[in-house]
């Protein structure tokens, strides 16, 4: 499978080229070439047709208008009506067509011929591949029950495959986008206000007067419409408070930047609650009519003064007070961003999310103009007619009586069951659009689990680390080549959007819905996919929605009428979906389950001498580890660096721009990658962009460029409340790479 592409560079040669001082030249040439391609193509090739669809480079799923001609995509543009695109695409979305021409693409089904993990495969036909998988799954089902099969998924094809798994009888489906991403936030908000914030987060940027961000590095985290709306709010004069140990792009624009010690956000949140109550500036109408537990909260936060928090977080107390004053001036029009990637420190994460929700409540900023608005649900669509799904046994987490408040199954819980056989064995994995080697903490445990499987099937579009470990590989059509299930969105303007083919795949690839139907048929659950064409399926789902398939294919997006009022009158009773029917400042459910009923600050341990805390984040030009091989994005941002403070760099003998290795306490090493020595990060902390440092040799652009945070995150912390894993729990040391005498630029993060 792995075949070096002409001009491909290994980590070693890249360092060499760069070391010779040629990197700027290399980059400039590549960029110019790219700009030339983009400028030139519409002139030489007239647009034949424009097809609306939506983007899959990340899960903001922006509406797209795709210009095409002769089975070629000429340009991708933001759909003007799409609430997540607002007429624009981000840098990644614009580059979507780069995947189509990628010579590294997966082109046909394959079965393993080498050892597991070697990435050696032979081509087979679809029928053979399906039969191999079905035989293995049927054997597992016979020996251990259907629950011994698990699905890991991310992306638009996932729900069809989930239907297949559930029809077959397994409850074990999970996504890293829960347990390694938003799990603690969804659970923390649900416990407090009765529901998670959802996606997109319902932030009323149009009316806000003040924005508070915890991490949430908007601009680097490039969720398209959220960034546009944020920029407009700032331009209108909304104030901005950012808590981040790093001067992120957005922190550099803040009125108050709190460069706090990692893991100390809850201390600052508690001190703001203290100030709001001690100064009697909290929103009386909201608290008295909507909340329960105020007296206990008031007692609880008495000791948490700004000077206490300043000590905990190592930031000036005056700045904590200044931020508080900005919030009070703006309330209730304060957006307290609930965050998205919040799996940082384990149980403290759900408690921090509770503290954010409680702060919003004290500001009266829930379902309020300029705060969080009340999102309307997405339009309900008909289910395609199918038999009843079977009754499912308890999933691994329920069977093990863990994570009482989890809203989804945990990926790591499935992995543990696979490794240990407890609470019951898992013997087959189906992985779809999820690179578990890069996205789950502790690669050793993932590999140990994979080694104990009878069958690992992976659906992907390119040869990544997880496909290298597969027994059978199903190549998926690219998102510009396929239908997926309908996309529905809620919030201010509920909509229905369509993903439809713009071009045909030149290879023997298939869409997820077809894989689910065809493999499902081999597994004996074909009745659940009783449609001949996908148009038939989509038409049936749209029946009664107010739009036909033909209309949706033409326009791309449809807005049914919605009557949900986005704002609440804080004086009137409202049925919060919590056990008490109120916003729960004190959570009886948490207390009864043995957890802190009100947030407390439990600082994570300090790094031992000579080591630094590893943190990570996003590049605006990449999505996780999905996009590094896309030639356009690779041209623009080929690698990452490790950020560290000049004081730490001096004591470690590390120099700016020179290559280093990064190593954890267990001896796992990543790199070499350039050091970015900068005062924009706190001492004791290092930072790198996630998604680089690929080891899959079939990715000829991406392989071995930069370093991988995933290679270092081993000692994760499980959150007993939500089942998520805190991943900022790792300490690392940094050593100069041998022979790295030359400097090379570190312009893009
Ligand atoms: N371009 C691009 N955009 C994306 C994505 C992508 O892959 N690429 N992914 C999307 C997805 S799925 C997600 S979940 C989001 C993730 O993006 P976010 O939700 O914004 O992720 P965070 O972890 O909150 O933000 C990272 C920031 O947290 C800071 N940080 C580290 N430790 C601490 C701490 O203890 N306290 C505080 N306050 N800050 C800390 C880091 O310095 C960094 O600036 O991005 C989304 N947007
Ligand atoms: N160390 C570390 N771990 C993290 C994070 C981090 O910042 N650092 N971030 C966490 C967060 S916020 C999230 S949401 C998760 C995300 O984690 P995952 O959902 O696992 O995302 P990726 O790791 O990008 O894996 C995506 C895989 O899908 C493939 N793919 C891309 N497009 C398609 C397609 O159209 N069809 C199919 N079938 N496959 C496709 C890619 O080639 C890649 O192999 O990771 C979490 N894990
Ligand atoms: S934010 Fe960017 S990558 Fe994500 S869906 Fe929108 S255009 Fe695509
Ligand atoms: Mo995420």
Image (cartoon, rainbow, N blue to C red):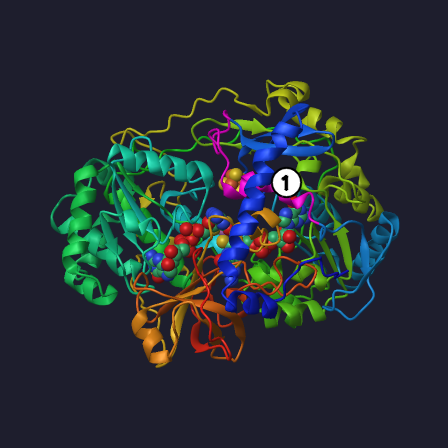
Q: Quadrant of residue 95?
A: top right
Magenta span of residues = 80-102
Which residue is pictured at 81% across the width and 41% down the height?
526
Q: Nearer the viewer, residue 17 or 77?
A: 17
Compared with residue 485, is residue 263 higher up or lower down, i.e. above or below?
Answer: below
Q: Is residue 178 visible?
A: no
Neighbourhood count class around disc 1 (C-alpha, 10 Å): few under 14, some 14–19, many 20 upward: many
Characterize the magenta stretch by its predominant secondary structure. loop
Q: Nearer the viewer, residue 380 or 446?
A: 446
Question: Does the magenta segment cover residue 49?
Answer: no
User: What percent of the width, then of the height, locates residue 27?
Assistant: 52, 54
Secondary structure of the residue carrying numbered label 1: helix
**Quadrant (top left, top right, bottom left, bottom right) of the C terminus:** bottom left
Q: Nearer the viewer, residue 294 or 361?
A: 361
User: What percent of the width, then of the height, locates residue 721?
Assistant: 44, 59
Q: Nearer the viewer, residue 621 or 336?
A: 621
Which residue is pictured at 20% across the width and 39% down the height?
283
Q: Is residue 20 visible?
A: yes
The residue positioned farthest toward the left in the image shown? 279
**Quadrant (top left, top right, bottom left, bottom right) of the N terminus:** bottom right
User: What percent of the width, then of the height, locates residue 708?
Assistant: 53, 65
Q: Quadrant of residue 594?
A: bottom left
User: What percent of the width, then of the height, locates residue 77?
Assistant: 55, 31
Compared with residue 620, is residue 6 higher up or lower down, i.e. above or below?
Answer: below
Residue beneath disc 1: 97
Q: Quadrant of residue 184?
A: bottom left
Compared with residue 170, is residue 348 higher up or lower down, i.e. above or below?
Answer: below
Indicate left or right for 516 with 75 as reference.
right
Beta carbon at label 1 within 8 Å of ligand 3:
no
Indicate left or right for 525 with 730 as reference.
right
Question: Does the magenta segment cover residue 92?
Answer: yes
């Amino acid at each position: 499978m792995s075949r070096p592409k002409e001009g491909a560079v290994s980590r070693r040669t890249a360092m060499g080229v760069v070391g010779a001082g040629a990197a700027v030249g290399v980059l400039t040439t590549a960029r110019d070439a790219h700009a030339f391609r983009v400028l030139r193509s519409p002139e030489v090739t007239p647009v034949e047709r424009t097809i609306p669809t939506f983007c899959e480079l990340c899960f903001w799923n922006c509406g797209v208008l795709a210009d095409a001609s002769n089975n070629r995509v000429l340009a991708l543009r933001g759909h003007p009506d799409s609430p997540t695109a607002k007429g624009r695409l981000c840098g990644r979305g614009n580059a979507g067509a780069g995947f189509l021409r990628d010579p590294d693409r997966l082109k046909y089904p394959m079965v393993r011929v080498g050892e597991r993990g070697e990435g050696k495969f032979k081509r087979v036909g679809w029928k053979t591949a399906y039969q191999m998988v079905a035989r293995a799954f049927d054997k597992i089902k016979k020996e251990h029950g259907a629950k011994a099969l698990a699905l890991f998924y991310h992306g638009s094809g996932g729900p069809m495959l989930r239907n297949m798994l559930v029809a077959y009888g397994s409850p074990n489906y999970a996504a890293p986008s829960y347990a390694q991403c938003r799990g603690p936030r969804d659970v923390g908000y649900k416990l407090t206000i009765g529901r998670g914030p959802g996606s997109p987060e319902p932030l009323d940027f149009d009316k806000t007067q003040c924005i508070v961000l915890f991490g949430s590095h908007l601009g680097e985290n490039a969720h398209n419409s959220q960034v546009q709306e944020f920029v407009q709010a700032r331009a209108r004069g909304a104030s901005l408070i950012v808590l981040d140990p790093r001067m992120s792009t957005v922190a550099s624009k803040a009125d108050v930047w709190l460069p706090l010690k990692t893991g100390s956000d809850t201390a600052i949140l508690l001190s703001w609650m203290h100030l709001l109550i001690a100064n009697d500036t909290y929103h009386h109408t909201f608290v008295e009519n909507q909340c329960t537990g105020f007296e206990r909260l008031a007692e609880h936060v008495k000791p948490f003064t700004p000077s206490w928090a300043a000590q905990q977080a190592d930031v000036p107390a005056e700045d904590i007070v200044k931020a508080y004053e900005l919030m009070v001036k703006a309330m209730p029009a304060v957006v307290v961003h609930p965050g998205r990637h919040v799996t940082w420190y384990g149980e403290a994460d759900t408690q921090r999310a509770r503290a954010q929700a409680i702060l919003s409540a004290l500001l009266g900023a829930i379902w309020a103009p300029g705060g969080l608005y009340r999102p309307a649900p997405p339009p309900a669509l008909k289910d395609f007619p199918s038999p009843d799904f079977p009754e499912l046994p308890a999933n691994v987490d329920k069977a093990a009586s863990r994570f009482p408040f989890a809203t989804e199954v945990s990926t790591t819980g499935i992995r543990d069951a696979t490794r240990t056989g407890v609470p019951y064995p898992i013997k087959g994995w189906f992985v779809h659009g999820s690179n578990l080697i890069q996205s789950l903490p502790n690669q050793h445990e993932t590999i140990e689990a994979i080694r104990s499987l009878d069958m690992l099937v992976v659906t992907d579009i390119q040869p990544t680390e997880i496909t290298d470990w597969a027994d059978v590989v199903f190549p998926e059509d690219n998102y510009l080549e396929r239908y997926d299930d309908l996309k529905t969105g809620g919030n201010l303007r509920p909509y229905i959007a369509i993903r439809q083919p713009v071009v045909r795949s030149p290879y023997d690839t298939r869409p997820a819905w077809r894989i689910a139907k065809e493999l499902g048929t081999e597994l004996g659950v074909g009745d659940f996919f009783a449609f001949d064409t996908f148009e038939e399926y989509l038409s049936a789902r749209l029946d009664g929605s107010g739009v036909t398939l033909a209309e949706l294919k033409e326009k791309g997006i449809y807005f049914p009428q919605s009557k949900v009022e986005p704002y609440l009158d804080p004086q009137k009773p409202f049925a919060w979906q919590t056990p008490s029917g109120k916003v729960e400042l004190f959570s009886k459910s948490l207390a009864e389950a043995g957890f802190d009923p009100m947030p407390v600050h439990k600082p994570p341990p300090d790094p031992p001498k000579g080591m630094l805390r590893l943190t990570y984040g996003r590049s605006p030009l990449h999505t996780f580890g999905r996009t590094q091989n896309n030639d356009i994005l690779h041209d623009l941002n080929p690698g990452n660096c490790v950020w560290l403070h000049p004081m730490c760099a001096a004591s470690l003998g590390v120099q700016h721009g020179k290559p280093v290795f990064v190593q954890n306490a267990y001896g796992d090493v990543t790199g070499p990658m350039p050091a970015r020595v900068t005062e924009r990060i706190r001492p004791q902390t290092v930072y790198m962009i996630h998604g680089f440092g690929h080891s899959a040799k079939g990715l000829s652009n991406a392989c071995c460029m930069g370093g991988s945070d995933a290679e270092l995150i081993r000692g994760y912390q499980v959150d007993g409340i939500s089942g998520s894993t805190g991943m900022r729990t790792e300490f690392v040391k940094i050593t100069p790479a041998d022979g790295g005498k030359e400097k090379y630029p570190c312009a893009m993060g």
